């Protein structure tokens, strides 16, 4: 049993046609929209394909559309999970020996904050931005109680698959940090 | 015209231009607009760190960071505190107006401009979830320009809803497809490495980190993303099951892992798949009618 709404939902007019007695202007409008849909979905599919000689050739024909309208397609999240276990910290070190965690520890930190810290630290081309970020944190403290230095640091241990994890002695962690000094 | 291409044209026409009740898209607009307000507010810190006073990108760098084709109103304004706060305020008001259906075309345009302007210059603290937001604001803009979001519309051509539906199905399909190119997913071991990252987990996974459970979760994720959602969601009788499983999938991820935006936004996008006679849409419509009876309408 179908009511009127469920028939509409399935795209049915009572006559069964999409739009009966369509005018010439309506036909042209549909044709133009259909052309746009074909271009739109083709651009989305191509935008999802990995870079290749083929994509390098066709990229200029659709990239302008995806980039200017904010439709870049990047759904590779977790497609290559890191083979490292990482700890991360943001600390403020004071002259009197106090150490504060301006954003708290990473366990309770919001995912966006963790992502921001990790990407600032792990990418080699983000050192300048990382330093500006650390100065931004430094400048939030009152002038008469500013830290001596702000540090963003991490330690990473390699992780192994099931078949080898019990056979390997974990090496020393890899350390990486950025810091700014008052 | 031969019969097969006559059938193809008819099927295409039905699929994109058949008439659809406007209710689902209106409910989607109201909920997405409300969610967008909370999204902007929660992004304030990251956005301000980048684009406000003493931020980590300068006005001159914004052009270079975005590359050809991408744009932002902050291209000459990053670091200007007044400009940042004004754009942020406009974004919040536009999202509220969009949700309320007040000057919906202008509101849709402003949410799209604001979202792109915020996301494009970010160098860190952003992920694909933010791209979903810019994509949805663009698709809503197309629907708004076509008049499909006008309050008082009873029916609309199907295409604006189809744009959302196909994009959502593509997110899952290509997410799964890209995973199949990685050995960890191919070998059924990917979730083991995901479990080893405590800064991205809200719970300890030690009890589940066995080859059997890891394999089931790894291949289960692939099956859902690559096959189940993109294909079965189009079959009406199976759709509630697929969407229900999808909600469970995202809620589980949101509760156990530190993934932002996706866990909350993808289930909201499922509204685009709900038929107007579904219980959820009927309940939302009834709630909206009650609200209009008790509050004066902002506009028609």
Image (cartoon, coloured by chain):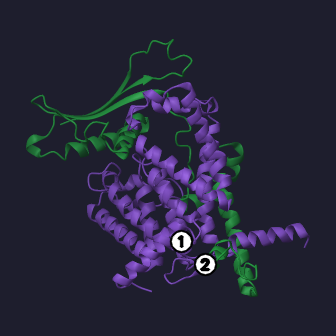
Mark 2: secondary structure: strand
| Residue at the image position 64 percent from the left and 36 percent from the top | B181
Q: Residue B161 is drawn in which quadrant?
A: bottom right
User: Chain A appears in which tint?
Assistant: green
The chain identifier of the residue carrying mark 1 reads B
| Residue at the image position 29 percent from the left and 60 percent from the top | B80
Q: CA distance from mark 2 to mark 1?
A: 9 Å
* Label 2 and label 1 in one chain: yes
The image's mark for residue B156 is: 2
Q: Is residue A68 above or below residue B14?
A: above
Visible in this render: residue B207? yes
- Is the C terminus of chain B in the top left, top right, bottom left or bottom right quadrant? bottom left
Could you tell me residue A49's position as x and y percent? 65, 47
**Circle 1 residue:** B25
Q: Is residue B217 above or below residue B51?
A: above
Could you tell me residue B228's position as x and y percent? 65, 49
User: In the figure, is residue B174 to the left or right of A156?
Assistant: right
Which of marks 1 and 2 precedes in the sequence?
1
User: Chain B appears in which tint?
Assistant: purple
| Residue at the image position 57 percent from the left and 55 percent from the top | B243
User: In the figure, is residue A26 to the left or right of B153?
Assistant: right
Q: Nearer the viewer, residue A164 or A34?
A: A164
- Is the N terminus of chain B in the top left, top right, bottom left or bottom right quadrant? bottom right
Q: Are circles 2 and 1 on residues that touch, CB within 8 Å?
A: yes
């Amino acid at each position: 049993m179908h009511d009127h709404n469920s028939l509409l939902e399935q795209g049915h007019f009572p006559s069964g046609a999409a739009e009966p007695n369509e005018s010439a202007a309506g036909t042209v409008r549909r044709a133009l929209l259909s052309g746009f849909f074909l271009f739109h979905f083709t651009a989305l599919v191509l935008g999802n394909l990995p870079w290749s000689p083929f994509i390098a050739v066709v990229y200029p024909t659709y990239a302008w559309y995806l980039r200017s309208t904010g439709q870049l397609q990047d759904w590779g999240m977790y497609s290559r999970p890191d083979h490292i276990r990482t700890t991360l910290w943001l600390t403020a070190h004071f002259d009197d020996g106090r150490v504060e965690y301006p954003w708290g520890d990473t366990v309770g930190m919001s995912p966006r904050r963790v992502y921001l810290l990790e990407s600032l630290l792990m990418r080699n081309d983000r050192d300048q931005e990382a330093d500006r970020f650390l100065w931004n944190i430094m400048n939030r403290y009152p002038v008469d109680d500013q830290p001596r230095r702000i540090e963003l640091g991490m330690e990473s241990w390699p992780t192994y698959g099931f078949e080898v994890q019990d056979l390997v002695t974990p090496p020393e962690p890899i350390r990486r940090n950025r810091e700014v000094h008052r | 015209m031969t019969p097969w291409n006559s059938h193809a044209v008819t099927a295409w026409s039905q699929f994109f231009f058949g008439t659809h009740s406007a209710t689902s898209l209106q409910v989607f607009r109201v909920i997405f607009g409300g969610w967008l307000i909370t999204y902007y507010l929660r992004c304030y810190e990251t956005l301000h760190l980048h684009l406000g006073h003493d931020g980590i990108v300068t006005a001159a760098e914004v052009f270079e960071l975005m590359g050809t084709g991408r744009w932002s109103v902050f291209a000459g304004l990053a670091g200007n505190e007044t400009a940042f706060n004004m754009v942020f305020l406009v974004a919040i008001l536009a999202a509220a107006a969009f949700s309320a259906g007040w000057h919906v075309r202008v509101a849709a345009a402003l949410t799209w401009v604001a979202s792109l302007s915020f996301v494009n210059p970010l160098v860190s603290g952003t992920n694909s979830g933010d791209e979903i937001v810019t994509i949805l604001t663009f698709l809503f803009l197309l629907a708004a320009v076509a008049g499909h979001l006008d309050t008082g519309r009873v029916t609309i051509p199907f295409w604006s809803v189809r744009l959302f539906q196909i994009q959502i199905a593509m997110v899952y399909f290509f997410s799964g497809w890209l995973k199949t190119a990685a050995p960890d997913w191919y070998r059924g071991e990917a979730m083991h490495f995901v479990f080893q990252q405590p800064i991205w987990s809200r719970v300890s996974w030690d009890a589940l980190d066995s080859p059997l459970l890891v394999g089931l979760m790894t291949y289960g994720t692939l099956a859902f993303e690559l096959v189940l959602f993109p294909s079965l969601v189009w079959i009406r009788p199976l759709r509630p099951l697929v969407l229900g499983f999808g909600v469970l999938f995202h809620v589980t991820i949101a509760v156990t892992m530190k993934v932002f935006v996706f866990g909350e936004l993808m289930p909201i996008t499922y509204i685009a798949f709900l038929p107007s006679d579904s219980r959820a849409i009927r309940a939302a419509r009834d709630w909206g009618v009650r609200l209009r009876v008790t509050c004066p309408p902002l506009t028609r």
